Image (cartoon, rainbow, N blue to C red):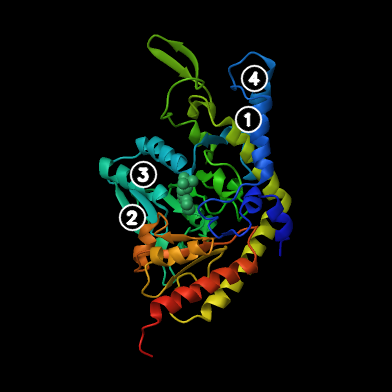
Amino acid sequence: MLDCKKIRKMFPIYQNYPDLVYLDSGATSLKPQCVLDKMNEYYTQYGVNIHRGVYRLSYQATEAYDQARQIVADFIHAHFNEIVFTKNVTEALNKICQMYQKKLKENDEIITCELEHHSSVLPWMKACEEKNMKLVYIPLNDEGRVTVDQFKKIITHQSKVLVITYVSNVMGYITPLKEMIQLAHQHHMIVIVDAAQAVSHLPIDVKDLDCDFLAFSGHKMLGPTGIGVLYGKKELLKTLDPIDYGGDMNEEVDLYHVDIKDIPFRFEAGTPMIAEAIGLKEAIHLLQSIGLDQIRQHELEILEYAKEKLSQIPNVTVYNKTSDIGILSFNVNGVHPHDAATFFDEANICLRAGHHCAQLITKWLHCIGTLRATFYIYNTKEDVDKMIEVVQEVVSFFHQFEVK
Ligand code: PLP
């Protein structure tokens, strides 16, 4: 187990809110002081624009921003010019959909699955509508997992893109990505991975996975809000036209022609998220110093403890008994998750209630939504005990009139 007492000291919110039980890191992680300090250092000591100024402070800011890109690249085993900064994973996934769909035509098939977050599937739903392409879903197995076998069965000559989540934000299942990517490539498809829920729990090696594009947000991995990452293989990125045009993405501009910069700068028009990139760099340092393997081990231990405790309470349904990361989705039978959530809030417990922007899977589960507790580095078994107490309270309140 990680030393949570020590870890909590790094997160100022616990000093300001000592009773906080934060079980919503799947939505966004808490922010450590070191990340805030680095961002503040930029704003107070060299807070000027990058790539433009011909003076020392601007060089310093440019260097810090470039370093951030290199640290992100190293973190996922990519090259510097394969990392495009965006405002979040949603923007990254939309951008790649808008850019890549220009290569597609009527009747092409986009393969995905019902575990997706809306941000990976909705852009392609719209693209399919507009270009008369087909969205095809890989049938999930009884547990709600995506499998290589089912994927294999639905591939046709028209299949062109696989867009898939690395880890489900509702079920916590890890997708068997490597085998699926190999299969997709044998059929000349490209693969776009939504790694929003993976990046803070699993080491990611894009070269080993061999995915074509991969995206994530900084704010779920101890970094600030307002920064996301789109990774793309450089030979593919070079074939794409930018969506946004404007300052800093061009070399030479004439009256009727613009020469755009090389990758990745051509995809980052305008002043980028400088402080946020610097904050993300610091978050990666912290994640690396704690160790992703240790992080996963810690959260799985908490998860097991929570599952065991929940299993002892009648009238509770757990939807993901075999979750691969610290995500637990459950409901008190017959109680709307929003109604239950008010009880948790009263006890200073932050957990998520609803469809988690992944309505396809809650529909697959035949529920309106779930209660979702996500466990991370600062969570303890005491947090779970407090959550369990409230679950018991909700069960007693809503089931008190039941005839035994
Ligand atoms: N994809 C997954 C799997 C997610 O869990 C989330 C957020 O919860 C997103 C995408 C969207 O993230 P953001 O709001 O940072 O763009």
Percent x, y for residue 252?
A: 49, 13
Residue depicted at 36% across the width and 59% down the height:
360
Query: Alpha-carbon distance for marks 1 and 4?
Result: 10 Å
Give the secondary structure at mark 2.
Answer: strand
Residue 371 at least partly seen? yes
N-term mark: 1 or 2: 1
Other-residue count near label 2 (Cα within 10 Å), few / some / many at <14 / 14–19 / ≥20: some
Q: Secondary structure at mark 1?
A: helix
Q: Amino acid at mark 4?
A: Ser
Q: Which residue is under mark 1?
A: 65
Residue 80 vertical position relative to residue 175 in the rendered view, above or below: above
10 Å crowding of disc 1: few (<14), some (14-19), many (20+): many
- Looking at the rendered structure, the kind of residue marked 1 is Tyr
- Give the labeled residue for mark 4: 58
Mark 1 and mark 4 lie on one chain; the one further toward the N terminus is: 4
Q: Earlier in the sequence, mark 1 or mark 3?
A: 1
Q: Nearer the viewer, residue 69 or 285?
A: 285
Q: Is residue 229 left or right of residue 258?
A: right
Q: Residue furthest top?
A: 255
Place of residue 152 in the rendered image (x, y in percent of width and height, measured from the top left): 42, 60
